[in-house]
Amino acid sequence: MTSYIPPSKNQSPYLPFGDQRGAQFYGKDILSVNQFSRHDIEYIFGVAKEMREMVTRIGTFDLLKGKILANLFYEPSTRTSSSFTSAMERLGGSVIPINEVRYSSVSKGESLPDTVRTLECYADVIVIRHPEMGSAALAAKYASKPIINAGDGVGEHPTQALLDLFTIVSELGKVDELTITMLGDLKYGRTVHSLSRLLTLFKVKLNYVSPEILRMPPEIITELKSKGMVQAEYNTLDPVISKTDVLYVTRVQKERFENQDDYESVKGTFVITPEVMDQAKDKMIVMHPLPRVGEIAMEVDDDPRAAYFRQMESGLYVRMALLAMVLGKA
Amino acid sequence: MTSYIPPSKNQSPYLPFGDQRGAQFYGKDILSVNQFSRHDIEYIFGVAKEMREMVTRIGTFDLLKGKILANLFYEPSTRTSSSFTSAMERLGGSVIPINEVRYSSVSKGESLPDTVRTLECYADVIVIRHPEMGSAALAAKYASKPIINAGDGVGEHPTQALLDLFTIVSELGKVDELTITMLGDLKYGRTVHSLSRLLTLFKVKLNYVSPEILRMPPEIITELKSKGMVQAEYNTLDPVISKTDVLYVTRVQKERFENQDDYESVKGTFVITPEVMDQAKDKMIVMHPLPRVGEIAMEVDDDPRAAYFRQMESGLYVRMALLAMVLGKA
Amino acid sequence: MTSYIPPSKNQSPYLPFGDQRGAQFYGKDILSVNQFSRHDIEYIFGVAKEMREMVTRIGTFDLLKGKILANLFYEPSTRTSSSFTSAMERLGGSVIPINEVRYSSVSKGESLPDTVRTLECYADVIVIRHPEMGSAALAAKYASKPIINAGDGVGEHPTQALLDLFTIVSELGKVDELTITMLGDLKYGRTVHSLSRLLTLFKVKLNYVSPEILRMPPEIITELKSKGMVQAEYNTLDPVISKTDVLYVTRVQKERFENQDDYESVKGTFVITPEVMDQAKDKMIVMHPLPRVGEIAMEVDDDPRAAYFRQMESGLYVRMALLAMVLGKA
């Protein structure tokens, strides 16, 4: 389902600001990084920058006043859920929070299409987080209102990939020509899969550093190679840290390991400390989708190259941009 | 408690639009279908129609700006909870969502009267869903602010009955002279009990089609008979489907059966398929309170007579109307 | 951590109403009753009174329009959570409700500092309820936005103490010269600890009435004595009820007892009945932080001296005042 590109739900878009590129997002779903062109990305980031300026200057504004977001989380994610809630509220809109799906009609056996068709009676846009791959696309197939995928299992998490990329652009001013090193759990890490796919729109070099059992899946390497991406794999950070512009660290999740000894042998191996930072460029940045549980030492937080909290903030602006766009207001 | 009619909580209503019928709802509780006259219903539906027009035209408006709804759900119901949340937000009001009652002061042993008297310090109206019959009336007895019953166990669910009836009126233009067939679990189905009671205000014919062990309770049949309702019971849909104007389908809930074999023997018997629809009138409608788990085949969804998602939407307008009315703004 | 006084987070406060006392709260944390002077209290109560007048007259107003509160509850508390939600909404602001922390990134092992630094990307002020003492101060150490402690384990609950005191002032017109009797669980009762500390700013007499195993902790008695507080301990209410101006009743929680027989022997001992009220002054008040589970008979509710529901309402105004103050709008 990752390559699903939604059909237009919009017949006659009303465009207050008359931008033709904005028009193409009105009424659309945000399901996969594969649906975006480089021009789309540039447009989204242009809107996100405006959002940042507005929030910095005046906090909130009433662009989406009267619009309602159904925030449908089948699995908990405080970070993503709060980010979308804040994005909608900073735009003057309202939120229907739905966090306890396991106790509700869904647990009575209701199908996702029925849930979505019910919610769109009450809301103008639906954000969905679901443990099963393809569920956001399934929801979009049945919904007439825009669906935004906030993570569907091992599938996609397109808004995370967009905010990651927006952080790189905001911090380093460009994406082309950068060396981006991904570290940690590259096998199960949904964020690195989505981001690496999105990066095929740009000219970058990708380094993968992971324990043997958590290597980037061969099918993704093959997919990216076919699009001309320069990629290299490593077992340690040493050979690449000094050439890295973006160090993207991920959490090695205990629950991914069947054998707990395997986890113990690996968990401390890829920790970013001030000593590691000493080997890095002055202008590089460290990113992490958070939560972290020790992959980056807290001593690194005060290093100006530690970009992970600014990365969280980027999420707000990118999600504000996407909400405004699919609701025809950007 | 089903016949409980709340005393007026309102001494000197301020009525911005000066309608005398509206006046009688200001400050009142919505507890039971038995509290409504036919004139009340007509008034509520008139306001609900206005709400639909406003939502269709401008999405939201600030009729209840500054008002706060406490959405107090002792048992989960995504659908009803979301519907009330949306209704309040579309009217410009705010919501205090209280979904985790089992973990909170209530689970520390607090009485419902104390909980309600606390919440009315913070809110202007309280919607309550509770597993015990009579609990909404109990809450209303102690609260000085309006209480809206969003389902109290096997008791009442008056806003569901009102939205069901509003759907019939919206779809077929009238209620009198219709043949309404209720199908499925008529014994435990709270919605069919409330709706059938509400229908005594109109001249309709009621057919009950259910498995033997899930027949409409004799006391309800007796109650409705005393009010002049024409009723008939069947074991299958065949004899009545072609004469039916409204087919109201309910879920046969597994949890209602002590013996799982009984459930298995019954669950597939009353499924609405395209073949069933072929026998039905061109102008009839199929309704369902949702969630469904197979009682209506998904193939039926595209049939224009399938009214169950439009029924969900009706819930929004009826609840907007009720909120505006009890807060003195309709 | 109870004496933690936060450093100023605010360098150049913008003060719309130009009050110098208001200035000192802008950008600050509310962590402990120990951070307040008597002048602070008077200022807070002045703002709270204005809030009450505004709510009474017009319901809500847009003082905090565009501001977002993250309501971060690591343990459930419907009452406190609803009160802060209502306070923010009545001021025209928005809320990010975070009630399911146990299921989210925190349960994946995220540290409180990381959670707080993430949330402040999305919100303008964070209210935190946490089971561990000192957690609110820890959060404040890392956050650059204001933190309000809504209870940290056996530590502090400063907004509760403030609303308790505000209730006394509102009901009796003063604090100095009053005799305040605290009854019930004085050992584990966080509210009586915070309130008694706050009362050291005033000239009152404190009576402690409790079962032997639930006496006020000696370290608190010593602390208050060093500040000149007049205190006395009793096993029954009889000797003091007729001289009491404020009777502050607390819940004897079953879960505090290792031995259930101890609980059973104590639970009925300190119940306020109409007979107890007969011995009390005409002008005294009965307070309780709620929930109650029998410590005050429901027959007492209609006594005009029963102030516990008005006390709940006071919480709204005090929390409105604090939110407005730390956000620089009071």
Image: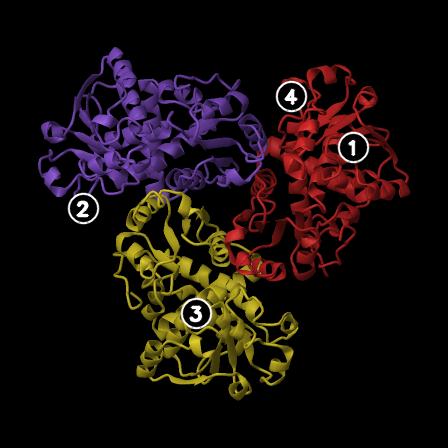
Chain colours: A purple, B red, C yellow
Residues at discs 2 and 3 both on one chain: no
Q: Mark 4 points at which residue?
A: B297
Q: Earlier in the sequence, mark 1 or mark 4?
A: 1
Q: Where is residue C10 in the image (x, y as percent from the top left)?
A: 27, 57
Q: Name the residue under label 3.
A: C189
Q: Where is residue B225 in the image (x, y as percent from the top left)?
A: 89, 40
Which secondary structure lies at badge 2?
helix
> How crowded is the residue under tag 3: few (<14 C-alpha within 10 Å), some, or many (20+)?
some
Q: Which of marks 4 and 2 is in front?
A: 4
Q: Where is residue A310 in the image (x, y as percent from the top left)?
A: 27, 39
Numbered disc total: 4
Between the residue at mark 1 and the residue at mark 4, the CA separation in whole angstroms equals 23 Å
> How crowded is the residue under tag 2: few (<14 C-alpha within 10 Å), some, or many (20+)?
few
Between the residue at mark 4 and the residue at mark 2, the CA separation in whole angstroms equals 59 Å
The chain containing the residue under callout 2 comes to A
Residues at discs 4 and 3 both on one chain: no
User: Residue A285 vs residue B323: left or right?
Assistant: left
The chain containing the residue under callout 4 comes to B
Which secondary structure lies at badge 1?
helix
Between the residue at mark 4 and the residue at mark 3, the CA separation in whole angstroms equals 57 Å
Residues at discs 1 and 4 both on one chain: yes
Q: Name the residue under label 1.
A: B212
* Residue C121 visible in the picture: yes
Between the residue at mark 2 and the residue at mark 1, the CA separation in whole angstroms equals 72 Å
The chain containing the residue under callout 1 comes to B
